[in-house]
């Protein structure tokens, strides 16, 4: 039977993620459009994004925080291009984004001394193999496989190399150990439901020391440059962006940060994602045709929850038919207007990916599950006919 209750907000995309509950374009009414981002009020808004992010996330005072171009990709790549080459590198890859950073390091930067520690979709590489005398590049939460590192205990506080962490689908939903991370990056478009385009980068004092003592042998585009004359560009970490940001996106980021405070700050945000992930896990446990792609519960993402279709009928299809069937499932939900962007990432095993980050309401997930069951039953019935 077709369910009757619909999610109020059918937005379950893993990026851009659902806007915060109650968001309307009126949230942008105070945007400083048509004004210079270098004007006094413009700079104040940019500085407020930095200060609010720092306060909500509990970033230590000695760490620098900046708004940078190019969303999370821009933030990660400016770190890789600016910092790597001083030591050997261990890069961890267990899904598409980690693989992308590994490709940057080996094929674009062409570093010679690189170890790529890999695992397939659903698993993590052996974290005990990581050598912290080297620089270490990894993703906190692998958005395309729904696998995250369980915690930061595997990272020593007294390491020699730098840790560079793409945390875009983790920050504001998971606790991060700031003393174990030298570079942390994210985009506004993820957990707080902001807009794409801009990235954030956090640098530890050790990362700043590397920037000021090491000059990479390759040219650095202007949009990657964090130093001038061997010194950190301090203004960048006070809201003087490298190039022009969108003041509409800035206003939206400020709105999302105000909402984050209203739900209890970081603890409230983490609790919301945990509650959502637990609701999905309850449905998965009760549903024979799906299973978490992530094997062990402690490495399961609480934001990008990836599910495999384990029904024997589906498993018996050839790979092309499996991919088409999973796409049809997501298409049916979209056509009904009950769940958008639920298909697994294009490079991941065919299945479902449900965003469970802080802006998603648990009640909307609870309303989605009967639709998922209905859509799968429809597809099975059509195949049997
Ligand atoms: C882990 C991870 N890294 C990087 C990116 C790229 O982010 P952006 O498109 O914001 O640059 C994403 C986007 O989904 C991601 O999930």
Image: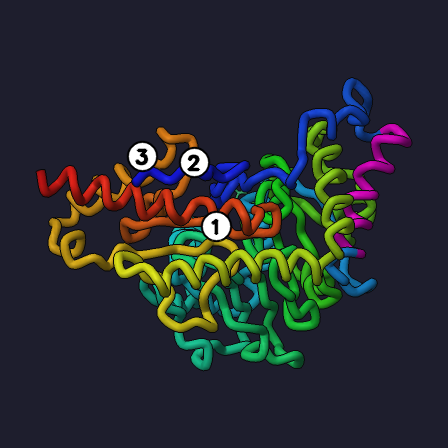
Query: For this view, does 223 lie left or right of residue 112?
Result: right
Whole-percent x, y for residue 40 in the image: 90, 31
Q: In terms of secondary structure, where does tag 3 sit? A: helix
| Residue under the image location 39 percent in, 43 percent down | 342
Choose mark 3 or mark 1, whichever is in front: 1
Tell me the quarter of the picture where residue 324 sits: top left
Main secondary structure along the magenta-highlighted residues: helix
Tell me the quarter of the picture where residue 36 sits: top right
Residue 50 covered by magenta stretch: yes
| On screen, residue 280 above or below 180 | above
**Ligand 1 contact, mark 2 (Cβ < 8 Å):** no
Whole-percent x, y for residue 243 in the image: 70, 33
The answer for how far apart the CA atoms under marks 3 and 1 are is 18 Å
Quick one: label 3 or label 1, which is nearer the N terminus? 3
- Residue tagged by mark 2? 338
| Tag shown at residue 366 | 1
- Residue tagged by mark 3? 332
Whole-percent x, y for residue 82 in the image: 61, 53
Residue 81 in sight in this render: no
| On screen, residue 297 above or below 248 | below
| Residue under the image location 78 percent in, 26 percent down | 31
Residue span colored magenta: 39-55
In the rendered image, the residue lying farthest to the right is: 40
Residue 316 covered by magenta stretch: no
């Amino acid at each position: 039977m077709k369910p009757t209750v619909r999610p109020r907000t059918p937005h379950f995309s893993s990026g851009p993620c659902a806007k915060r509950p109650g968001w309307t374009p009126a949230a942008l009414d105070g945007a400083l459009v048509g004004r210079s981002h270098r004007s006094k009020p413009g700079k104040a808004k940019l500085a407020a994004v930095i200060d609010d992010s720092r306060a909500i996330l509990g970033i230590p005072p000695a760490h620098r925080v900046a708004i940078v171009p190019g969303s999370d990709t821009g933030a990660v790549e400016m770190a890789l291009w600016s910092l790597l080459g001083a030591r050997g590198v261990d890069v961890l890859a267990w899904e598409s984004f980690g693989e992308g950073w590994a490709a940057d390091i080996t094929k674009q930067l062409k570093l010679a001394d690189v170890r790529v520690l890999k695992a397939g979709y659903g698993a993590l590489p052996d974290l005990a193999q990581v050598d912290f005398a080297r620089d270490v590049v990894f993703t906190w939460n692998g958005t395309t496989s729904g696998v995250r590192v369980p915690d930061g205990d595997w990272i020593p506080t007294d390491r020699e190399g730098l840790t560079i962490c793409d945390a875009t689908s983790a920050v504001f939903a998971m606790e991060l150990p700031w003393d174990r991370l030298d570079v942390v990056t994210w985009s506004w478009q993820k957990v707080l439901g902001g807009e794409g385009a801009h990235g954030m980068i956090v640098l530890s004092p050790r990362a700043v020391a590397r920037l000021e003592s090491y000059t990479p042998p390759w040219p650095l585009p202007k949009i990657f440059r964090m130093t001038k004359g061997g010194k950190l560009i301090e203004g960048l970490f006070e809201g003087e962006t490298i190039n022009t940001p969108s003041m509409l996106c800035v206003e939206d980021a400020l709105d999302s940060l105000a909402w984050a405070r209203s739900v209890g700050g970081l603890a409230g945000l983490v609790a919301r994602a945990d509650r959502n992930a637990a609701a999905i896990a309850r449905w998965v446990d009760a549903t024979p045709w799906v299973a978490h792609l992530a094997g062990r519960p402690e490495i399961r993402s609480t934001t990008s929850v990836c599910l495999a279709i384990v029904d024997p009928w589906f498993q018996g299809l050839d790979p092309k038919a499996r991919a088409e069937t999973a796409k049809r499932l997501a298409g049916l939900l979209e056509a009904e207007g009950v769940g958008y962007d639920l298909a697994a990432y294009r490079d991941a095993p065919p299945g479902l990916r449900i965003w469970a980050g802080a802006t998603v309401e648990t009640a909307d997930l609870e309303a989605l599950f009967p639709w998922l069951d209905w859509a799968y039953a429809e597809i099975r019935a059509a195949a049997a006919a």
